[in-house]
Amino acid sequence: MLSVTDIMKKMGVGRNRAHEIINSGEFHVLKVGRRYLVHEQIFENWLKGEC
């Protein structure tokens, strides 16, 4: 599972942009407490344009 911080590092974007990506609705996001998590493989496929 990837957190917002992980997405920031992978994409080289800031926190606000990472939150925009997570909240875009293009993939399932799990909220645990105050953390937003995305399954790593789903995110990688989205980056490759496979979603």
Image (tube, rainbow, N blue to C red):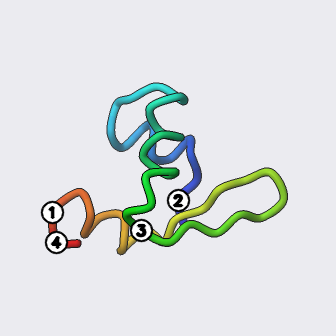
Element carrying mark 2:
loop
Element carrying mark 4:
loop
Q: CA distance from mark 2 to mark 4?
A: 18 Å
Contact (Cβ within 8 Å) of mark 2 with mark 4 = no
Depth-wise, is mark 2 or mark 1 nearer the camera? Answer: 1
Residue extending furthest front? Answer: 25
Q: Residues within 10 Å of mark 2 (few under 14, many from 20)?
A: some
Element carrying mark 3:
loop
* Image height of 48 relative to 7, above or below: below
Image position, residue 18 (x, y; %): 47, 39
Image position, residue 19 (x, y; %): 53, 40
Q: Residues within 10 Å of mark 3 (few under 14, many from 20)?
A: some
Residue 2's disc is 2
* Residue of label 3: 27
Amino acid, disc 2: Leu
Amino acid, disc 3: Phe
* Image height of 35 relative to 29, above or below: above
* Residue of label 4: 50
The answer to whether 49 appears left or right of 15 in the picture is: left
Q: Residues within 10 Å of mark 1 (few under 14, many from 20)?
A: few
* Image height of 3 relative to 41, above or below: above
Q: Residues within 10 Å of mark 4 (few under 14, many from 20)?
A: few
Element carrying mark 1:
loop
Query: At x 36% / y 44%, what residue is drawn?
Result: 10
* Residue of label 1: 49
- Indicate which disc, 3 or 1, sits on the residue closer to the N terminus: 3
Q: CA distance from mark 4 to mark 3?
A: 11 Å
Image position, residue 46 (x, y; %): 26, 63
Contact (Cβ within 8 Å) of mark 3 with mark 1 = no
- Indicate which disc, 2 or 4, sits on the residue closer to the N terminus: 2
Contact (Cβ within 8 Å) of mark 4 with mark 1 = yes
Q: CA distance from mark 3 to mark 1?
A: 12 Å
